[in-house]
Amino acid sequence: MPLAEFRLEKVKDSGKKADSHLYFRVKCPKMEGLLGGKGGFGSLLRSIKAKQSELSQNMDACRDLNTGRRLGQVQQQERLREWHRKKEEEDKFVEEELRRYEESKLDLRERTAPQTKKIDNALRQTLDEGSSSMAQ
């Protein structure tokens, strides 16, 4: 701001003789806005944001105020419980699928066994007829 814009005014005396100091007040006009400028503040904010995103958000070493345990241990225990629950569900699913497979295998054997006997009997008859015709 140019020096010509500043005003120097003398402040009223207090009227005491011991007060030999002169008091002045500097007045400067209110500025509506500054023109020009270097800029670059936005890039500064972007760089700060990028640095903050690099910071670790890992709170595992902190302690829980209620129990005093480390948060990492509490979270690990929760993950282990969840894994056990999923493992039990998967084991039940596998057992059910194996049971269904065995049942379907037995059912298939029961349905195909009479046909196999019919084929065996028909094959024996054909072989017997063929061998008897060759013997003649």
Image (cartoon, rainbow, N blue to C red):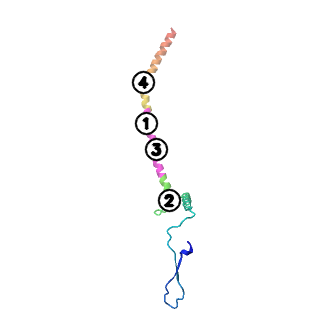
Q: CA distance from mark 3 to mark 2?
A: 29 Å
Amino acid carrying mark 1 in the image? Arg
| Residue 118 versus residue 15 in the image, above or below | above
Label of residue 71 in the image: 2
- Of the residues under marks 3 and 1, which one precedes in the sequence? 3
- Of the residues under marks 4 and 1, which one precedes in the sequence? 1
Residue topped by disc 1 = 100
Q: CA distance from mark 4 to mark 2?
A: 66 Å
Q: Picture coordinates of residue 125 (x, y %)?
A: 46, 16
Amino acid carrying mark 3 in the image? Glu
Q: Picture coordinates of residue 49 (x, y %)?
A: 54, 59
- Of the residues under marks 4 and 2, which one precedes in the sequence? 2
Residue topped by disc 3 = 90
Which numbered mark, 3 or 2, is in the foreground of this view?
2
Contact, mark 3 vs mark 2 (Cβ under 8 Å): no
Classify mark 1: helix, strand or loop: helix
